[in-house]
Amino acid sequence: MSNIVLIGAGQTGRGYLNRFFKDEKVTFLDIDSELIERLQQEKKYNIFFGKQRETLTLDNFKAYTVDSKQGLDALAQADLVMISVGQKNLDSLVPLIQKALAIRQKGDVDILTAENGVHTKNYLIPLCQDKRVHLAETIVFCTTLKQENSLDIFSEDLDYLPYDVVSLGHQLPYKHTVAEKNLSSLMQRKIYTYNCLSAVVTYLGYYKGYEEYAKAANDSEITMCMDNILQKLNACICKEYEIDVDEQAKFSQMAVAKFQNKAIVDTIERNARDVDRKLGENERILAPLCILKKYGKQSDALLLVAACAVYYGQKTSTLLKSFEKYFEILPKEWFTQIVDYLKKLDNQMTIIEVLSV
């Protein structure tokens, strides 16, 4: 039985990662003392999958605050550490893990990030000064949602955890963990496909006044935009990564089906926040625009999504810089088109009207 430490007891750590280790000894570490106290007191929680699957009850864990002596001891004894704390918080964990390594009496330890971002292991590179550390990344495809006033989680029925076996140096022994020899390619395809389509649903959905994510994903105008974007984007992805056309089409339709699944009760607001990061050049809107540019394609619908993301940022005062700064890597004529779309959005034109004028 392995000693697993999950840093981050939120919806990904609690609702997704722990299911892969239900037969192992798991320790949750989190900065939220109230959450840790509740885990200690209740000693179990449920993961609900709707009608697709029976409820999974997990009671295989202990829980400590991340700065506690017990937490440090658990880290020092870990065989595997999985981290899901948000990309911006990763580097703050380096001193803690280094402290645990300093008192570690065991041999090698696997440390894997499970974040919704790119190159996330780079934040933890200083840990590799200790030759016992094997550092790699995983990709999270599964949607998990917290239940109000409860430790329970609602989850998409998906047990699939791909990880970078090349960086890690060996395969993991846990069921449903999948060794990927080219994780960076899969990650980029996820950003160009899943994350991009999520942005389409989210920011067009916000503009149209939706609150429920699945309702927005099933809206006829938004569905039209997804189809139009995929028609051009999939062709570029196939060229860039030498992917079979049918394979990429299946990959993208899995994403559409996931977002349109009404059993997954998600919100536009949850997906829309952190718009400053999501307008980054390696993120879900600009990265797909750049690959379109590389192969001589243009998507008016995706430029509209960029405009709607700015619209959301302006309405919620969450942009951290002037909006033109986000689009400096785009052709000038594309930026001009985004500005024109923003003006039309301010005039409350429909999506079809914006794209047809």
Image (cartoon, rainbow, N blue to C red):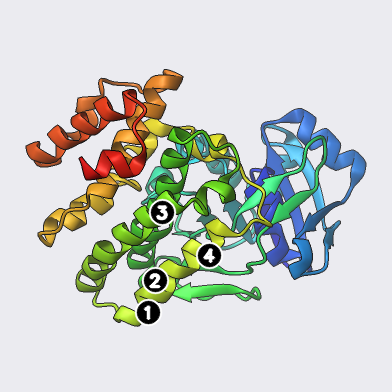
Mark 1 or mark 4: which is in front? 4
Give the CA separation, mark 3 to mark 2: 29 Å
Of mark 3 and mark 2, the one earlier in the sequence is 2
Number of the label disc, if any, that sits on residue 35: none
The residue at the point 26 percent across, 62 percent down is: 233
Of the two numbered discs 1 and 4 on the same chain, state the one appearing first in sequence.
1
Q: What residue is shown with label 3?
A: 197
SS class of the residue under badge 1? helix
* Mark 1–mark 3 distance (CA, rounded to whole Å): 17 Å
On residue 257, the disc is 4
- Measuring from the top left, give residue 232's x and y in whole percent: 24, 63
Residue under label 2: 166
Task: Identify the mark nearer the N-term, 2 or 4.
Answer: 2
Q: Secondary structure at mark 4?
A: helix
Residue 117 pos. (x, y %) = 42, 48
The residue sitting at 78% across, 37% down in the picture is: 148
Q: Quadrant of residue 235?
A: bottom left
Point out the residue furthest to the top here.
317
> In which quadrant will I find the C terminus?
top left
**Residue 247, disc:** 1
Q: Does dot 3 land on a helix, a strand or a loop?
A: helix
User: Cα distance, mark 3 to mark 4?
Assistant: 11 Å
Instruction: Give the CA separation, mark 2 to mark 4.
Output: 31 Å
Confirm or deny contact between disc 3 and disc 2 (CB under 8 A): no
